[in-house]
Amino acid sequence: MKFKYEIEGGNFSKAGNASSAVKKMLKQLNVPPPIIKRLVVALYEGEVNVVAHAWNGCIQVDIEPHRIFVIIEDEGPGIPDIDQAMQEGYSTASQAVREMGFGAGMGLPNMKKNADELNITSEVGKGTKVEITTLLNE
Amino acid sequence: MKIENLVDVLDGNVVMGEEFLQKEVLFGFASDLMSDVLTLDTDKLVLVTGLNNLQTIRTAEMADIECIVFVRNKRVLPPMLEIASEHEMVLIECRFSMFGAIARLHDAGLKPVY
């Protein structure tokens, strides 16, 4: 089963709408709550990153029998140094993002913690693609 | 502790969720940084924060947090109510500082997460 949700860059009033929709859908599909929580926390951090940094993006969720595979893809400035971005505390977020309770350099490490597999690719000036794999039969 | 007792201890104003005041909470976490809140994996948790915006509610939704205390006289804003209501959250406003609120909650038996 595949689902797709759009993310609007820069619009903090809608940040979380896509993750919320995914959460509802996973609940309806009776995915175990601890798995839902890990995935949506990673997803929400990713969605906030898209809203905070990119121009627009989307979340694609693919539910398979043994795993949930999510792609968060955006058109935006990209990440010049992914290793640096993965370090706790490293952030390029604006003051506006910090005022929303984010931008302390915790997002990507938090996503890694909550994913069974996390893969990030990025091209400066074009955008970023984050792939999250969550296993269903741990 | 029941949320009802927490409201008493904080002399709080229940903005939403009157019908859930009998629910139990065991742990408290105080932060204005939502990414820190998202690192937790604790049930029966109260979030104590001074951050009164939509992302506070979204964060609670993702982290399955059912009770939020807004300190420093921060007000719950109208856009926050709809999402909070959908997820059956209890939203409480309180006039104390974060330190003051936490001290009272700790004295009343609420535990830290770590």
Image (cartoon, coloured by chain):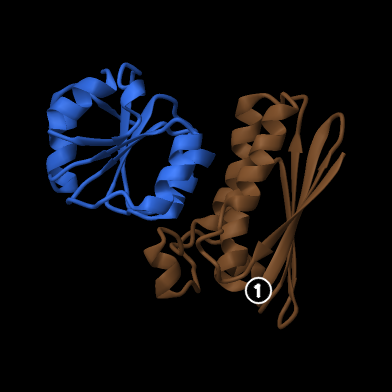
Chain colours: A brown, B blue
Q: Is residue A133 above or below residue B1?
A: below
Q: Is residue A69 visible?
A: yes
Place of residue A137 in the rendered image (x, y in percent of width and height, measured from the top left): 77, 24
User: What residue is disc 1 on?
Assistant: A79
Secondary structure under the numbered disc 1 in the rendered image? loop
Specify the quadrant of the image occupied by residue A14: bottom right
Q: Quadrant of residue B37?
A: top left
In this rendering, the answer to whether A83 lies above or below B69 is: below
Expressed as whole percent of the image width and height from the top left, the position of residue B30 reads 29, 43
> Which sits in the foreground, A62 or A78?
A62
Quadrant (top left/top right/bottom left/bottom right) for the C terminus of chain B: top left
Q: What residue is rendered at 54% in x and 61% in y?
A: A87
Residue A48 pos. (x, y %)? 56, 59
Report the quarter where the N terminus of chain B lies: top left
Q: Residue at x 13, y 26 (%)?
A: B107
Is residue A5 toward the left or the right of residue B91 in the image?
right
Relative height, residue A137 to residue A121 (above, below): above
The answer to whether residue B39 is seen in the rendering is no
